[in-house]
Image: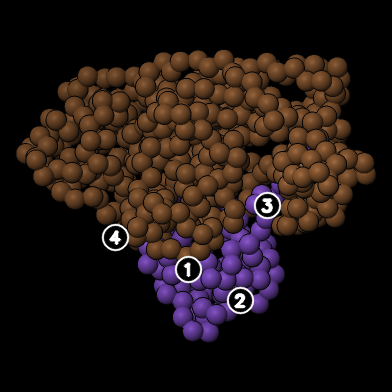
Chain colours: A brown, B purple
Amino acid sequence: MKQERAIHELYDDPERADTVVFGRVASHGGNDVPRATRRGFLGGAGLAALSAAVGGAIPFAAEMPAGLIPAALAQGAGSGAKEPQLLKFPGKDERLVVLGERPLVAETPEHLLDDEITPTARFYIRNNGQIPEQTKEPDNWKITIDGEVSNKLELALGELKQKFKPVTRRMVLECGGNGRSFFSPQARGNQWTNGGAGCAEWTGVRLADVLKAAGLQPSAVFTGHYGADPHLSGEANRVALSRGVPIRKAMDENNLIVWAMNGEPLPPIHGFPVRLVIAGWPGSVSQKWLTRIWVRDKPHDGQGMGGTSYRVPVKPIVPGSNDDGKTFRDLESMPVRAIITSPANGSKLAAGTNELKLRGAAWAGDQTVKQVDVSTDFGATWTKANLGKPKNKYDWQRWTAAVKVPSDGYYEVWARGTDSRGVMQPHVAGNWNPQGYGGNPMHRIAVLIG
Amino acid sequence: MRVRLAVLWLIWSAGAAWSQSPAFTPRDESPEEFAPGAGREETFYACTPCHNFKLVAAQGMSRERWDETLTFMTSRHNMPALAGAERKLVLDYLERAYPPRPARPGGWNPFAPH
């Protein structure tokens, strides 16, 4: 373990590290370098050293980009811990990784997202405040719709269920900070890898139906959402989180006010008895323990709106620089993301395995996913995956691929999603911002054959 | 200074009345679990009225960005403002204990011999 940490420290200056540790010299082209390619040259003692570090021979070493930290050394949460802290919470899978206990935040390792519908036990947890006391009378739970409406509503959950048509839809919910840990320099906040996402079947009524019943005034431009979770400080006059969306998004027929997840009542940690699900946008607009939707005549200015919160630069800024976010824009649709859900990172496969059978999921905020490609040679060549269709809008798309490999050894599998507009996942998290939103570089896993 | 921060923490903690669901009680943290250095306790008690210190320890930032973060916590999350020697002590600690790290801190090799 000590040696790996040392490698990491050296990778502060990756090209220098390649030279010092592995004897690898990055080529920038020209005739003076043996095997001149735009990628790194790795051979002899250097290759042996790198192979030893990852635990196996690297058949595609010649394609490995200079300065690349092997995926085998690059996985893991940003806590500085050698091993992740695993969740212990009733009803939850004990393999979820804790990012924080106060507030409670836990992500789902990618290989646990291998189901079409994410089991509730494996669904990620994100809180911004304390977990509220569980109500004993869910049907009497009150939800208020007020502000720029002609008919202010105060509905008990029981009434809501009676008055509006119930709908069940399979939709991805994703934390706005998903992928934050991939930013360099490190962005501030919970260090999510790709596990701040899941796809569940949600049952509820359409938000649009409820807003129509309240009668939106012409002055209505934005929503502001409130929940029952107390502020972390415990101060009654502080709001833990209150975000909202423009009316055009709020009226999307896919948005639901839900009381059931995967056919069961919402678990307390996911917002019992009632929450919003506004799919495709940062999860923080899908208020848990929903008590109020305030229809605003201007963009909402609640806790978690404005500044650098859930916002990204319009004009790219220097990574690591200070910025008050005033010129940023709200992060609306989440970016395209494909993950490999099988095999798991760190899988050892039998000697002689000559084909990798891959499975995964892909989704793209308000868009659909047009294509998923996989590479086992550090991106030199790509194979198009078989991509399924979403069951309904905002469902994720499952994909499979089978890729031949030439020998035993260490492989990295990379997956890259392309959304319906043709936008692809980048190699690294771009458009750096202080709180690390919009990070969606390709997912990489390491496998060892033999 | 240490006394003032500790008292503040006690007041806040009492006010917070941790009523997390009975199913989950956050683990108690103590300053000693985290990177040693002058200012550790003061920093711990300044941050933990609201969130656990694990979150702080998961960050790696320059002094300038830590400074910006303290300002952010005060302006957006109601943390009592830290000023003067108190702020310097906290920043000295954070800068030394949690400096910028390489892109993927905390990585481990799934194939390392055990």
Mark 2 falls on what kind of element?
helix
Residue A65, disc: none
Tell which tag, 4 or 3, sits nearer the viewer. 3
Q: Nearer the viewer, residue A78 or A95?
A: A78
Q: Which residue is mark 2?
A: B92
Indicate the secondary structure of the residue bearing disc 1: helix
Q: Amino acid at mark 4?
A: Asn
Chain identity of mark 4: A
Report the Cα–Cα distance between label 4 and label 1: 25 Å
Chain holding disc 3 = B
- Disc ID at residue B68: 1
As drawn, which residue projects farthest toward the left? A150
Same-chain status of marks 4 and 3: no
- State the image quarter where residue A271 is shown: top left
The image position of residue A49, as x and y in percent, is 89, 44
Q: Chain of mark 2?
A: B
Measured from the top left, where is residue A56 in percent x and y? 86, 33
Q: Secondary structure at mark 4?
A: loop
Q: CA distance from mark 4 to mark 3?
A: 37 Å
Q: Are marks 1 and 3 on the same chain?
A: yes
Left or right of A70: which side holds A105? Answer: left
